[in-house]
Amino acid sequence: MAVFDKVTLEVQERMEEISLILMRHENKDFCLAKVHPNSWRLLSYSNNHKEYRFILVPSPAFERLIIQREYPKIVDRFPEYFGTGNDWNIIRAIKEYDKNHLLRKYSDREFFDYIRGETMAYVFKIEDDETISNRILRLDLCRNINSGNVFQGEFSMYLSTLLLKVIILFRAIIKNSL
């Protein structure tokens, strides 16, 4: 993990810059601008005898739901909320499951806004000279869902396919880096 010593400050600065820009753009009064480096993941991928390295910086909610694979546990614990065609039931199940990690009690709408805006991860590519690429990927669990959308029962499918999409995105980043 020596690579963190050289790039930690740069990653933290870039994450804070991006978060503040998004906060202003989305007209929010808060944003997740820092994640402790102990939560980061150093990932590597080899292609044609060349190694590509990335740092994945997950939000606490992304860490629990996606990386630690909590979402299958949510389905097991609250099966009555799934398969109904109503994504609000899924939001309620996640909120109920996650309530011990929350700072306060949230309405369904507030919790939806929280997971829509803060259940994400940044992916930073580490260049050969130990700097961070200007191309930064932000993975969002619910970015395209907004308050005007009518849920169509797709949220649970999205959860189950997100990790596959992450792998595909990593491959695209690497292909475009060649």
Image (cartoon, rainbow, N blue to C red):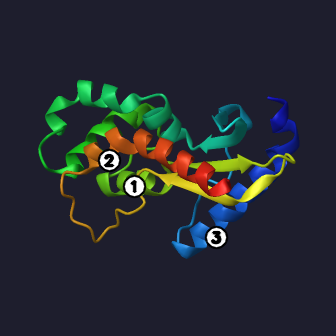
Question: Do the residues bearing badges 1 and 3 touch, measured as CB atoms within 8 Å?
Answer: no
Residue at which label 3 appears: 21
Task: Work out which quarter of the rendered image holds the N terminus and state it.
Answer: top right
The kind of residue tagged 3 is Ile
Q: Distance between the Cα atoms at labels 1 and 3?
A: 18 Å
Where residue 42 sits, quadrant-wise, is top right
The kind of residue tagged 1 is Cys
Count how many numbered circles sit on residues in the image: 3
Where residue 75 sits, quadrant-wise, is top left
Q: Does 157 sit above or below residue 142?
A: above
Q: Earlier in the sequence, mark 2 or mark 1?
A: 1
Residue at which label 1 appears: 142
Left or right, 69 with reference to 91? right
Residue at which label 2 appears: 158
Q: Earlier in the sequence, mark 1 or mark 3?
A: 3
| Spot occupied by residue 153 in the image (x, y as percentages of width and height) | 19, 51
